[in-house]
Image (spheres, helix red, strand yellow):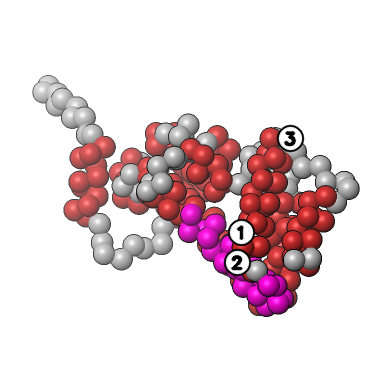
Amino acid sequence: MEHRKAIAVTDAELREEVERSATAVPRPSVARARILATASRLFYGTGIRAVGVDRVIAESNVARMTFFRHFPTKDHLVVAFLESRATADQHDLLRIRHEGGGRAVLAAIASGVMTVPTGDGFRGCEFVNTAAEFCEPTHPARLVVNLHRAWIRDRMAEALTELGHPTPQRTAELLLMLRTGAIIAASLEGFDDDDGAFEHAWWNLIDSP
């Protein structure tokens, strides 16, 4: 009996095949959602650089061809992870603004620090963590991080303007720095604000310019 030799297919060849068969308009896919959910869990819990494509494929239980059809490179997956988190955050904040106005927006952003989990699964802010892992300012992941942080800052500036604050843009930048520092500290030592120091500093910047 004649046996055929197994032919090794490289990732580059898989990508080429995907590009040939890809359609112009992406369709909703259960496999894509599963890959993204798995990557989101691993990227946040373990770190982006520590998680390889092979592990994402294995834990998503998809074929390599399926993975590369949806995410031609790991960078595409990282960007999708960040954009999905940013979209969820932005939708929530816009809803809060619609329902409660500018002060509610500022309260919600502060609450994100004061209600952080204290368990082992908390690793801080995924956007700050990503920026720490990718030092190149032009990396696609860094661009998503920068855009999202700028979006949050601008929504705070709008809220401060609505409240009649005399320096809304500069104060929004200070609030963002305060929040970032608090999140990083919480991921390292836990968040202990029994005396309300963070909340006092937050609202002091807003109400006592």
Choose top left, top right, bottom left or bottom right for residue 89. Answer: bottom right
Mark number, residue 189: 3
Residue displayed at 87% across by 46% down: 194
Mark number, residue 173: 1
**Of circles 1 and 3, which is in front?**
1
Q: Position of residue 44 (x, y in %)?
A: 56, 41
Q: Along the polypeptide, which appears first: circle 1 or circle 3?
A: 1
- The reply to whether the C-beta atoms of the residues labelled 1 and 2 are less than 8 Å apart is yes
Q: In front here: 183 or 22?
A: 183
Mark number, residue 169: 2
Q: Position of residue 81 (x, y in %)?
A: 48, 50
Q: Secondary structure at mark 1?
A: helix
Choose top left, top right, bottom left or bottom right for residue 100. Answer: bottom right
Is residue 154 within the magenta segment?
Answer: yes
Q: In front here: 18 or 83?
A: 83
Q: Secondary structure at mark 3?
A: helix
